[in-house]
Structures are given as structure tokens and as C-alpha cells.
Amino acid sequence: MRVKPRSVILGLVTLGVILAGWTCAEANRRVERRMTWHYGEPAPQWPSAKHIVLTFVDYPHEFVGVYSPDLGPYLESLRSRQVQVVFEISPVYGGMHGIDWINPVKLLDLGVGRVRGTVWYNAVQVGDLTRWRSDFSYGGRKGIGRGSPWD
């Protein structure tokens, strides 16, 4: 079977457009946000982990919770209740990562996630700390607030 040069060129151009779109959409970019922290209610599911609640200073209605055995002692060692947090975010693809791309039904999330403003995010640095154990983490919103920390 012989592959036509036109098909190869079309495939390479398509791949180039996809990669350029990924780059222009700033997929998997990193953002820094100033946050305050406090301890939340402990959970019986994670008895060895402290429940840390991080709230965005500029978006006090948005928060992130982490159950971690080592993040609390680090935060307690800081002079302030405020800490700089670096997040890796992917704002365009509605949280589709890894194996989700194999499932064609999930491709629907591509457009829906963007319209709803859904983002995938992951804290990669808290203050100077770049590694910590986490049993569970979540994000949420209280009430109605303006804007989003991901804009």
C-alpha cells in the first residue's frame, strides 16, 4: 500500500494546527494566586491528614481543600496566614486529560466545558513547598461571587 504525499502533508498540517491551537489556548499553563489558609473540619476517612482550606484572596468565594499529613506543618511554619500558590490549569478542554481523550463521548466536554468555564486545576507549589502527600483534595465556591481565579 502506497501512501500519497498529499495525505502525509494534510496529516502534518492537521497535527500542526492542533498543536498550535493547544499552545494558543494556553493549555496546561501555570498561574500564581495569593491565598489564605485555615484548618477545616477533620474527616474520618483520612484520620492521619489535616484538612487545610485555601481561600483565594482576590476571589474570597472560591476555595480549595486539601487533606494532607504534611502540608499543615509547613503552613504553620510560615509567618503569615497568606501564601502564594502555583496552579497548573487547563482552561479549554473541560477537564479532559489522559485516557479521557480515548473516549469519543467525552469529546462533547470539549465545547461544553469551555462554554461553562470549566477548568482542570492542580496545585503544584504552595509557598516554597513543591511536594506533599495528599489523601484527597477538592475545590468549591461559596455563594455568588464575581469573577474566577482562572480568568
Image (tube, rainbow, N blue to C red):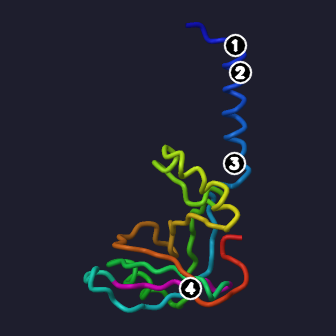
- Give the structural element (helix, strand or loop) at label 1: helix
- The amino acid sitting under disc 3 is Thr
Pointer 1 with pointer 2, Cβ within 8 A: yes
Q: Looking at the rendered structure, which numbered label has been put on residue 5?
A: 1
* Residue bearing mark 3: 23
Pointer 2 with pointer 3, Cβ within 8 A: no
CA–CA distance between discs 1 and 2? 6 Å
Q: Does label 3 or label 4 sit earlier along the sequence? A: 3
Residue shown at 45%/48% (left/top)? 99
Q: Looking at the rendered structure, which numbered label has been put on residue 106?
A: none
Residue shown at 49%/43% (left/top)? 102
Viewed as shown, does residue 101 lie left or right of 47? right
Residue shown at 38%/85% (left/top)? 51
- Tell me the quadrant of the picture where the N terminus can be found: top right
Q: Position of residue 123 (x, y in %)?
A: 51, 69
- The amino acid sitting under disc 4 is Thr
* Residue bearing mark 4: 55
Nearer the viewer's eye, disc 3 or disc 1?
Answer: 1
Q: Position of residue 18 (x, y in %)?
A: 68, 40
Residue shown at 27%/80% (left/top)? 45
CA–CA distance between discs 1 and 4? 55 Å
Q: Does label 2 or label 4 sit earlier along the sequence? A: 2
- The amino acid sitting under disc 1 is Pro
Q: Position of residue 75 (x, y in %)?
A: 44, 84
What range of the chain is rendered magenta? 50-58
Residue 60 found in image quarter:
bottom right
- Give the structural element (helix, strand or loop) at label 4: strand
126 or 19, which lies in front? 19
CA–CA distance between discs 3 and 1? 27 Å
Pointer 3 with pointer 4, Cβ within 8 A: no
Q: Is residue 102 magenta?
A: no
